[in-house]
Image (spheres, helix red, strand yellow):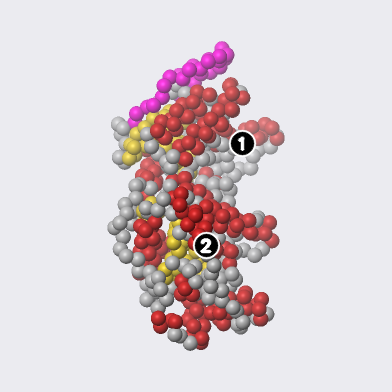
Amino acid sequence: MSSRRLSAHELIETVVDPGTFICWDAAPQHEHESADYAADLASAQEKSGADEAVVTGEGRVRGRRVAVAASEFGFLAGSLGAQTSARLIDMFDRATAERLPVLAAPASGGTRMQEGTPAFFTMIGLTAAIRRHKEAGLLYLVYLRHPTTGGTMATWGSLGHMTIAEPGALLGFLGPRVFETLYGTPFPTGVQVSENLREHGLIDAVVPPEELGAVVVRAMDILARPSVGAAEASPGVTTVPSQLRHESEEQHRDRVWDSVLATRESRRPTVRHLLKYGADDVLQLSGTAQGERDPRLFLGLARWAGHPCVVIGQDRAQGSARPMGPALLREARRGLRLAQQLRIPLVTVIDTEGADLSQEAEEAGMASAIARSLSDLLGVKTPVVSVLLGQGTGGGAIALLPADHTIAAEHAWLSPLPPEGASAILYRDTEHASQLAAAQGIDAWSLLEAGIVDEVVPEDVEATKDPRCFARRMSAAVVSALDSLAYTPVDALPAGRARRFGAARKVRLVA
């Protein structure tokens, strides 16, 4: 930790617009404290200039009204006592009543030892207040400061929709001094550090305090009330072109195989191109917030032609050569929960060569991750748009497919196995891959005819030659779908999906 530790008021002054902070704190009512504890409280107040271990209130961040809570580490190491929790609970409840987002900036050694179990018990009530705030569809942003440990890290420090941290901050459940005292050996260095937590998918970003305001504003701008109705008509096609209905078997096979090869081109646009050229603004998140992260998943908040949404997209261009594992789908489910909590649409982007087929993936619950993703998507009470962007292989693809509206790029495809894998099962070779790809109806036009996708966006120019045009055409289809779903009652969406995916499909017989 190289920079000086900021006090609560210094942190607030760094982030909040000058002259806009209004303190919400009433004087704490400490009862039944011992003489020693009373002396500790008096000393802490004199040392820190604060009357408790947290300062709460409201202010404006670049003009946007925000509720704020910041720990004062100089007051008994920012510890969580009964009055600290009461102050935080009051802040969350007032923010909920006034429909304000919350920015919390903890820095604490944990629950207050001088108060024992009663202070420890307040973790439950504080968690309940945060839950009420999130259930109201309001944004909760957390900025973890040095140090944050114990009961603070296990309550208001770990429940944010988005979690950012100060560079080099000590963050963790167990304080290093406690570990060394209990076990007689130092805790390994470099583990409980912001940058390591970011790498392991526990926090979303690491930024210095002076950059925090910009992140807060971007998140609030992206999630601002949607504007609907300004989108152009979708460029998608909802009926199969007549010329394709009259192609020969050989022409059909060659066309489908050309699509498969096109999606395997290393320069084919990915979900990041879709967002770069199509979205108004994007704020990337990272990991499950529970210790897993797959670089092949893009997770973020985006604003698409006035629509705030959560985007979860498979990004085949990122990470190692290893296929997607179950962590990717667990991270995707975090995005699904965010969309439902924030009451904004979800956009899923499918582009995968398939799930990891390994002992590690099996033991980590690959099948379970697919099943839970399918179940959650079918039941989520927020509009869902899925986009078949490129490859759509196996359970890894179908796990993100259930939606209220599905869009496919013309060369995208969906198959239970790579065509070569299907050929290996049926013919014990890979030479029949193109024949099977055509026969199984994996291509976008066949998917449209079968009712598996709702529209196909033609690729009039090769996507690799004009990724900007490709991304903008796909984005226009996404925006049109979001517009069409904007007025659908969310409670009706799961039943609609049940009807949609419960319908019988046309079955192709593979010779």
User: In percent of the image, x 59 and y 58: which residue is there?
Assistant: 370
In this view, 68 is above or below 473: above
- What distance separates the C-alpha of mark 1 from that of mark 2? 47 Å
Q: Residue at x 55, y 14 (%)?
A: 32
> Which amino acid is tagged 2?
Phe
Q: Is residue 64 left or right of residue 409?
A: left
Residue at 32% across, 65% down: 233
Where is 114 relative to 217, above or below?
Answer: above
Q: Residue at x 56, y 55 (%)?
A: 375
Q: Earlier in the sequence, mark 1 or mark 2?
A: 1
Identify the magenta region.
21-48
In the rendered view, would you say 250 is above or below 98?
A: below
Asked whether residue 464 appears in the rendered view, the answer is: no
Taking depth in this image into account, of 7 and 332 the one nearest to the observer is 332
Which residue is outermost to the top? 35
Q: Is residue 110 left or right of residue 283?
A: right
Residue 355 placed where, x, y %? Answer: 60, 64
The percent position of residue 177, horizontal first and vertical second, equals 62, 33
- Which image quadrant: the C terminus? bottom right
